[in-house]
Image (spheres, rainbow, N blue to C red):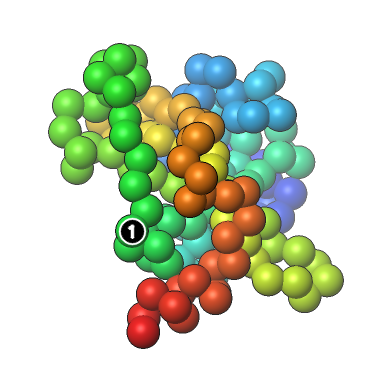
Amino acid sequence: MKIASKSLGEINVDERQIITFQEGLIGFTPFTRFALLDAPQKPYFYLQSMESQELAFILVDPFLFRPDYSLDLSEELCSALGIAAPEETLILTLVTAPTDGSPVTANLMGPLVISKATRKGVQLILADPRWKTKHDVMAELAASRK
């Protein structure tokens, strides 16, 4: 199917790329269907709203720059999303890429948890004090390689 995207133009989306967030994302609750797309700049992804071409997010796998990242998923959440095993889970974090040259940051406090099997997702809010809303991706990537 074809969808419109402000930044990517008209794109073809496979049904397997569509993720449903029943409760939407924080601050964007009316929007529940998104297409998960590879971004031209690796290792990033786009999460494009299927309901508004103006709404898209940049995502990154937090384990790429924070190998110590962790979150506990309750049995109730796993059941609701249809997750039977850890390898069926995709964890991604929202990225902020300021236009003023400030560092690109990732929100490790509010990760997206997605079931690869059911393509259902949820945004969590973590209370772990290690995770903030603005982690400098490049600085932490450099630190993780030392």
Q: Which residue is drawn at the image coordinates 51% and 45% (left, top)?
A: 129
Q: Which residue is mark 1?
A: 68
When asked about the image quadrant of residue 81, the answer is top left
Q: Going by the image, does 74 lie left or right of 65?
A: left
Quadrant of residue 14 within the rendered picture: top left
User: Is 28 left, or right, of 23 in this rendering?
Assistant: right
Q: Residue at x 75, y 71 (%)?
A: 102
Residue 100 or residue 7, whichever sits in front: 100
Farthest residue to the right: give it. Answer: 100
What residue is at 33 percent from the left and 58 percent from the top?
Answer: 68
Q: x and y percent of residue 29 in the render?
A: 66, 21
- 92 left or right of 28? left
Q: Position of residue 131 (x, y in %)?
A: 51, 49
Q: Position of residue 7 (x, y in %)?
A: 71, 55
- Figure quadrant of the C terminus: bottom left
Residue type (three-letter) at the residue carrying disc 1: Asp
Identify the residue at horizontal 34%, vertical 47% (top origin).
Answer: 70
Q: Residues within 10 Å of mark 1 (few under 14, many from 20)?
A: few
In depth, the one of 72 and 6 nearer the eye is 72
Judge left or right: residue 121 versus residue 49.
left
- Residue 95 visible in rendering: no
Labels in figure, total: 1
Q: Nearer the viewer, residue 133 or 45?
A: 133
User: Residue 114 versus residue 11: which sits nearer the camera?
Assistant: 114
Kindly give the residue lying farthest to the left in the view shown. Answer: 85
Farthest-out residue, bottom: 146
Q: Secondary structure at mark 1?
A: loop
Residue 83: x, y in percent? 24, 27
**Residue 6 visible in the shown view:** yes
